[in-house]
Amino acid sequence: MNRTITIIPRPLSIEYGDKTIGISKKSVSICINGETRNDIHNTLKTAFKITGIDTSEKGLPVFVDIRIKDNDENNEAYSLNITEEGIRIKAEGINGAFYGCISAGQIISGADGELPQVSISDKPVHSWRGFLLDTCRSFYSTTFIKKMLDACALHKLNILHWHLTDDQGWRFEVPEYPLLTEVGSKRQDNTLPEAIDGFYDEGKESRRWYTDEEIKDIVRYAKERCINIIPEVEFPGHSSALLAAYPEFGCTGGPYHVENRWGIFPDVLCLGNDKIFDIYQAALEKITKLFPSDYIHIGGDECPHERWDVCPKCLERMKKEGLDSTAELQAWGTTKIASMVAALGKTPIGWDEVLENNKHNALPANVIVQSWRGIEGGIKAASMNHKVIMSPCERFYLNFKNKDSFEEPGRLGVTTTKKLYTFSPAGKELKLENPDQKNLILGGECALWTEKLPHSRNAEYLLFPRFCAASETLWLPEEEKDFEDFKVRIEYHKKLLHQLDYRFYEGELE
Ligand SMILES: [Zn+2]
């Protein structure tokens, strides 16, 4: 029999005993000690459900002892012991108890009539373990988003970074500006022909934004899985959808259209126009109502400045603010948006471009920097005492191909599972001026940008198993990771992915 624990992400410490414990069926009966709030039982039941394990009165006993210390419900550490009486989990937070049950569920799911006698002690190295889903380039159903929240929980990821606005679509309602969704969610020219044979056609979906009720439902679903959702509203680039809805916010006045192509577009928000801050104020207030998260992502990436160079309003703003170039306008705008986010009681996050051109407008100290063009942005941000999220594209972008083959889907480059796995956000590749700055590296996010991925089943194929590798690289300290061991475990884990109906790539991992 297989006596090895094949959990992904692998627990920090596993000690094996001599015995095995026979189990007759794959269901559990949960018994909670300590904290016995009503919602906790549901949360733990959900953890087992995510791993494909039912709960029933006559199932294998799982004793969960939760003693919350210092009001820290979110403590993620847990211990797990398999004994002849059943499984014992101890945690000092709801999240730790949840992760203990996820581990127990994975162990039971992989068992073949017997459980190994083990003692596990586990906690993550990083507090920020995220997955970015782009729902702008391709629009996904709430069913798929929930399925991805289950996948996050199964792999102990605690952040879903929800990319909600971009050139190709604006995906949430702002009541004062109804055209953002009515116009900004719809592409003008679908590349696919209209279906005439009754088959599903992506051009025919009528609504391509998420209603408030849908968003609240997703936020609730995430919370039950110990996941925090971070909404992202792009500023000031990647704004074609906003401009298509309200052309007066662009430098030329338009006309503009919701983009059907991918890339970087010259038409961005006119930073000489004060009214753009009204629309962002309304959007940010709405985001604040919908998402309880302490953070709002304000984008900031890939913003060309060529329209600003010839726009009288932008040039006037530059003069008034004493800026040396239009490039510095972006830093000025970032400072303003960041202060609006802070005034709403939230912490702003920006892509690493927010570190540039800020001679006259220093990046506010509270801005967290997400490093995507390699790790250099993260190093620079840490040297300036900013907190950092690592998402270097060549390691953490799951829309890259799995292998260098014309036949494989994916774009922009190749990232094998090994290439991803061997990256650690605060690992040896990170050469910091001062080793203490490592504390500023909160963790990382793997990302799925969804150009050319209109169907979620194809998105899943690109995601797995690299998503699983990302979870382990965010959970374990670098020195505890072992790719050869991961390769063995992923073969067992694939059976679980298959059982849970996730598609995955099956070719070489390195
Ligand atoms: Zn302008």
Image (spheres, helix red, strand yellow):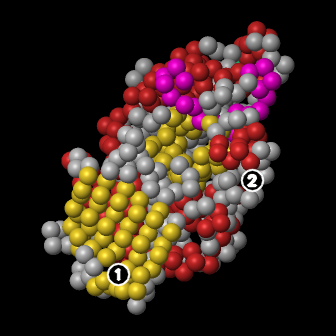
Q: Look at 34% across and 38% down and name the residue there.
A: 216
- Is residue 265 left or right of 494 when viewed as pictured? right
Around disc 2, counting alpha carbons within 10 Å, would you say few (fewer than 14), some (14 to 19), or many (20 or more)?
A: some
- Is residue 31 left or right of 435 when viewed as pictured? left
For this rendering, which residue is in front, 15 or 5?
15
Residue position for label 1: 115
Q: Are marks 2 and 1 in contact (CB under 8 Å)?
A: no
For this rendering, which residue is in front, 416 or 27?
27
Q: Look at 41% across and 72% down and name the residue there.
A: 119
Q: Quadrant of residue 182?
A: top left
Residue 432: give its label: none
Where's the C terminus, which quadrant?
Answer: bottom right
Q: Position of residue 292 (x, y in %)?
A: 40, 34
**Is any part of residue 296 visible from this angle?**
yes
The amino acid type, in three-letter code, at marker 2 is Leu
Q: Is residue 98 above or below residue 355?
A: below
Q: Position of residue 234 (x, y in %)?
A: 59, 34
Q: Which residues are magenta?
A: 342-361
Residue 430: give its label: 2
**Is any part of residue 199 visible from this angle?**
no
